Image (cartoon, helix red, strand yellow):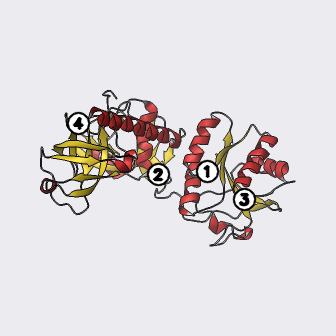
Amino acid sequence: MGSRSLNKEDHEAIRMVFQRLCEAEDKVELHFGAFKGEFRVLAEASDRVILGISEVERGQWRLKPGSRLTLNLLDRGLPFEAVVDFQGHGRIHGAEACHVTLPRLLRALDTHRLADFSPDRPVPCAFGDQQNNVRDGTATAFGEDGLELAPPEGTRILGDMLRLNATSTVELRAAVGDSLALPVRVAYFGERVWGLRILDSADPKLVGRYRQWVMEARHRQEQKDRSRFNPGGLEATRIPGKPDPTRASAAPRLLVDKDPLLLVVAEDEALCARLAEALGRKYGLAALDGSQGLLRPSLASLGVGERDWGRVKLVIIHQRIRAGTASELCRRLVKKEGCPLPVLLAGQEEDAELKRNRAIAAGAVDHLVVEPFHILSVLRTLDATLALFN
């Protein structure tokens, strides 16, 4: 695994960073002349980022279209810097906001760190302290020549457990799936982490296995990031004035009264009518034109209650819905509402394999092609999906 630049220059990779910030409701730091402030990421699109900068703050900073600002952010614990241009101001769902250009480059800061790759979740691992006691820590970042390790909770002073230049052994069994103990030396102290460099005396085979695992783990995360990426842009879930995602949607319309019953969430009435006509001999169909909030409270007329999902046996979410995205609604349905039913995300045939991966990452079973509409293909997918869950 050769050395590589930690800068982000790929347009899609940069957009993924801002989508992660948007989902996490995180902030970025802006600098303009003598002014500095932190502002929440409200939305991102292919050419811009929308930040929660108020009219008062915009006036105080004297921001005008074309004003150049420095932007700093943290992505998975790693700091980046960029230059953006102020594009203008307006409102998003009634909330005051300002637009800045999407950066062409996110320049990595703190490049001396042993942190080429930072996973979504810290990796548990054991290590030896200065008294040779075995401790439980978490690896927060990995590099070709070492890693960053956070101490057990409650540790007040890092140097009391491992001082600078102290040697130790880190056991990565939980990550690698097999015994892999690396001899390391404390190269630096970070923000509540040690930077641990692998000793030159380490077994080359163990180091090779470690580097191979880092490369594969980074590749898996990149694939996951691509599957979650929304090319149409993303809005934060909670924006002042945006419909509350915990509110119930409108009541469903029963198009075909038959069991098993399928629920279609879509704003396209023509699609719902076509599905009812094509599937009505075999399936019942209910349509819901509303996606602002939780589904369960709005489905009482279909027998859905607190303990079960009544007559509904499968949910189809079309890519065009009233608020948010189909992926967001699917995640909310599966994670927040604990829906045990199979969910299909429906849309166009173009890039079907990529859309299938994104659907699965959102918690759905598959991507259902309805544009163009081929009744036999739709029926086969529905039959196969219901067979898996019966």
* Residue 364, label in figure: 1
* Mark 4, residue position: 202
* Mark 3, residue position: 390
Give whichever of discs 1 and 4 has the lower sequence position: 4
Mark 1 → mark 4, Cα distance in angstroms: 44 Å
Residue at point 77% right, 45% down? Answer: 380
Q: Position of residue 356 (x, y in %)?
A: 62, 41
Amino acid, disc 2: Ala
Name the mark nearer the viewer: 1 or 2. Answer: 1
Give whichever of discs 1 and 3 has the lower sequence position: 1
Name the mark nearer the viewer: 2 or 3. Answer: 3
Answer with the quarter of the image where residue 252 lies: bottom right
Amino acid, disc 4: Ala
Residue at point 12% right, 46% down? Answer: 164
On screen, residue 297 versus residue 255, left or right, reads left
Amino acid, disc 1: Ala
* Mark 2, residue position: 236
Q: Is residue 325 above or below residue 354?
A: below
**Are the residues flagged by discs 2 and 3 in contact, CB closer than 8 Å?**
no
